[in-house]
Structure formats: structure tokens, C-alpha cells
Amino acid sequence: MGAATHKRALPRRRRRQAGRTPWFDWMVLPVLAVLAVVIGYPMVSAVILSTEKYNPVSGFPAQGVGLKNYDRLLNSDPVFWEALGNTAVYTFGSVIVASLLGLVLALLVENLSDRWRALRMLLLTPWAVPIIVVAFLFRYMFEDAGGIVNAVLLDVGVIGSPVDWLTSGRWALFTVTLANIWTQIPFFFLVFSAALAGIPTAVVEAARVDRSRGLSMVLQIKMPFLRGAFLVSSLIMVVANFNDFGKIWAMTQGGPGYSTTTLVVYVYRLAFEGFDLGYASAIGVVWLVLLLLFAIIYVRALQRDPA
Amino acid sequence: MSDTVTTRTTSAAARAVRLGARRPRRWGPAKIAGVVVVVVALLWSLLPLYWMLSTSFKDALEATRLDPTLVPQSFTSANYERLITGSLPFTTFLFNSLLTSLIAAVVCVVLSMFGGYSLSRAQWKLRTTTSYSILAMRMLPMIVLIGPLYLLLLETKLLNSYLGLILGYTTFGLPFGVWMMKGFMDAVPREIEEAARIDGYSRLQILFRIIVPLTLPGLFTTGTFVFMESWNNLIYPLTLITDIERQTLPAGLLLSFTGQFKTDWGGMMAASCITTIPLMVGFFLIQRSMVRGLTAGAVAGQ
């Protein structure tokens, strides 16, 4: 083979090799195989189930009902709307309060010296407490008779008679949300601490020279730097709260009545207490759509202003 | 120290002494308010935990007193002894939880290592699509999956088995692990691999001899995360396990302390203390990576 032909052949071979980029890689196969079984199949199955009437305990086979399940949840199921409202209160209530408190703490602790590292760690501890323990602990502290919270409030004179924190529809959602806030403040505290540490010192110094102090320093100089951290961390916690089952179930099982039943708890109650798998799946699908919509809005917000 | 300047005037010196400050640090109202907030935050974070610990050493009578005692008067370790000797199968729950969480962690780490490596390095056409599909799975509400998953395990006779439970844990462990490992492997410079390739290493050899040693902290973090999430999970054991002897710690405790032992607050708090320990250890081991783990993949290009 002459040098000339070799030169001409090389680019062509390269092109052919580029065209031979494989479609797939076996190394990712085990992951995809497991995910196909535990997520792919159930997803498809849930969509199909949502158009059926199926009770696995009854012994009758599944029966196609078209869109009847969706019709029911939109038009004749007050509990669905109540659960949706509870979900909104629980999700956004927790995120708003926990992120604000986390931010305040991060700002206050920001300039502490290394000697106070332990203090940061102590502020993080609620995060490391298992969900079931949080539930038990709040159940015990917020008990009507003998709970420490009522005892202290009675003693101080804030309340005249014991408040039924977890056994009345009026307070249960508040108490459950409070427990959730307790566990989530550390997350926001850590995220905002990291974001604050990432602000270029030059910016802060320049602002200080311009006599920017205290609140105006925080609002005008530091806040813009925290926007990205806020969006990402609140998205994560909104999704987590949307999907949260453990705390609510372990504290109230969705009761009294439906007062602490969020969508996830409602789906669970329908599927594993009423064995109405078709209707439960329909709600699951609607909820999946809601969550995706929310995620898309958020990603847009992030892209508009990359942090 | 600018004290030398201030001591020239007696009033300034007196003020410095009064405040006991070596440095002229101003204790304005804002600063005091700040300290108060931090102290309140500390109490808010730690008092519930103290309350848990304190109650776990009280006897039944004291734990339900209408005027609670801050320090246990009837100091007793009976609550802990009862966990081992009593009718509550606490040690069985503990064993089940440890076993399933550990296996789930190991399985997810190994699979994520391969998957993450491929998604980080290998050139193949569906790579980006696959990456983002797996990322989307992280947001899936598990409750949508649980009905069909239950039916699937029912048909394959895996209901009530460790394997079924571990499969359940992989629904959150794998999407998380893959993105986490992809992130760690993206951070390893490609030049190192090039050198190994010239030396004639195969892909598997590169992965095991070059990449794995360099991403060991990542593997450890991923494993700890999956372990903690599995340890915390309630919905899978509640639905996929029906035999109390096979139950995990959170679900087993919930079932026990909602029915039979409903008002055994001392026992409940003792069990809570034990349940907290593994999670605390895990948390403080990987505390620096906590935010990174939770936000893995949440920021494009991370």
C-alpha cells in the first residue's frame, strides 16, 4: 500500500469508526435491568390499573372501567380535594418556615470562628434522627395528658386547658407539620451555610467599604447569591414532602378523620386499607403529573437564572 | 488590639472594663438578639432529644406524670432490658433492619459503580437520555409504584422476603447511587485513564485499579446514604412484609407501639434511642457530603 492511498483511507476509516459509536454499553445494563423491574414495570402497570376496577382481596379479576376513576376523583370525591389541601399545607408550610429559619441561623452562625464548630454540629442533629423516632418523640411530647408541651404551656399560663394536639382535626396537621419542620431546618441551615461561604470575599469587602451593614448587607448583597441555593434546596424538599409518608403515618395514620391525610397517605389508605387498587392508582397518576409540572416550572426558574 | 488607643480616655477604658471585653466588640441589641436566637435554636434542636433520653430511663409511672420531671427520679435501665428480654421482638427487628439495609447498600453501590462509570465515561448514543431518565426516577413518588410492586411480588412469591424488601429499597437507592457515582467519577481526570490504556489495561482493569481506588470516598458516601435511607424507610416494610418476625425496626416498632404497647412511653423512648444510633453514626461520618448527596443531579452540569 502506497503512502498516497493510506492518506486518503485514514479519514474514511475515522468517519466509519465515529459512525460506529455503540448504541449501548453493557456496564449500565445491570442498573437498567433492576430499574426496569422495580420502576418501569410498576409505572406502566399503575397507568393500566388506573383505568380498571380491581380489588386483589375480592378474588374477582380486574375489570376495565375506562376513565371512570379519574371522573370520580375530579367530580365526586371530597376527600381527594381535602387531601390535596393538606398536602399543600404540609409541603409548602414546612418548606417556607424551615427555609426561613435555616437561613436566619446560617446568617447568625456565619461569622463564628472555628472554635464554635461543635455548635454547628449540634444544630444539625435533628437531621440525623430516624423518621420513626421523630414521630414517636412528637407523639409523646404532644400527648394530651402527660405530654411535656401541654404541661409547660399550662404551667406558663399560655393555655387554660390541655390542647389535643394530635387527637383533634383542628391541630393535628399543625403538629405534624411542626415535627417535619424540626427535621428539615438543619438541611436548609447546611445548604445556606455552604452558599454563604461561597460568596466571594471581595464582594462583601466592597460592600463594607460602601458602609453596607447588617440588614442591608444581607438583603442587598448576600441574598442574590443565595437565590440558586434556595431554589435547588426548596425543590428537593418540596418533592420530599410531597412524597413523605413515614412521619405522617407514624404520627396520626392520616387521622383524626382525614385531617392529616395527604395524597400519599390517601393513596396508601385506599390501596392497603380499602384494597381499591384501581382508584388508588388513578390518584397516583394524577399526582405524578402534578409533581412533574412542578418540577418543570422549577427547572425553568433555574435555567432563567443559573446560580 | 486597639485597646491601647481607647484607654487614653478614662470613660472609654471604664466601658471596656465594664463589658469585660479584650477586644472592643460591640454588644448592640442586634448582637444580643442574634445570640438569643442561636440559643433558642440549640434548645429547640436538642431538648426533644434530651427528653427522649431522659424518658428512656424513667419507670412507667414517672413517664406519664402530669407534671413531668426533667431528670429521671426513678432512674432505671429496665426499659432497655425489656427490649431484649421482653415480648417485643426488638432484636429480631434490629437484625432484619441491619441485614436488609446493609445488603441494599452493597448492591446499590456495586451496580451504581458500573452504571455511573458508563454514564460518566463511555461514549454511546443513548447515554444522555439514559442519564436523565434515571435522574427523573429520583423524583418519582414511591407510592405510585407500591401497588403494582406489591402485586408483582405477590405473583413471584417474594412477598414477605428479604429479597423483595431489598428490591423495594433499590427503587430509591439506585437512581440516587448512579447519579452520585457519576458525579464522583466525572471529577476524576481523564488523563489518568489514558495513561493506563496505553499500558494495555482493559476497561474492567481501569475501572477496578484506577477509578475505584480514586472514588473510594464516593462509594463509601453512596453506601452510607443508601443504608440510611433504607434504615429510615417505612412504606416498603409496611406493605411488602406481613410476618412480624420478618419486620424491620421502624415498621416493627410502629406496629408494636400503635397496638399492644401503645402507652409504654419509656420502652418506646428506649427503642427510639437504639434506633437513632446507627443513623447518627452514619450521618456524622458523611456529614460533609450530605448536601452534595441530596442535591446530586439537581443542578444541571453538576
Image (tube, coloured by chain):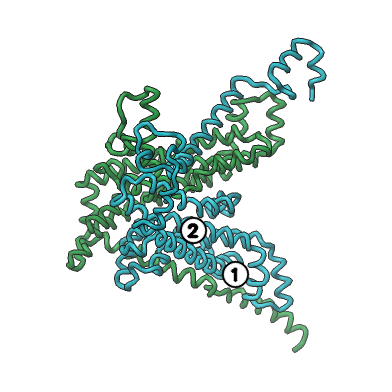
Q: Position of residue B147 (x, y in %)?
A: 31, 61
Give amino acid for label 1.
Answer: Ala
Whether residue B244 is situated above or below residue A154 in the rendered picture: below
Q: CA distance from mark 2 to mark 1?
A: 18 Å
Q: Which chain is cyan?
A: B
- Can the viewer see residue B108 in this picture? yes
- Can the viewer see residue A240 in this picture? no
Which subunit holds the residue at mark 2? B
Residue located beneath label 2 in the image = B135
Whether residue A268 is situated above or below residue B215 in the rendered picture: above
Residue located beneath label 1 in the image = B122
Image quarter of residue B210: bottom right
Q: Position of residue A152 (x, y in %)?
A: 40, 29
Q: Quadrant of the C terminus of chain A?
A: top right
Of helix, strand and loop, which one carries label 1? loop
Q: Is residue B156 left or right of residue A2?
A: left
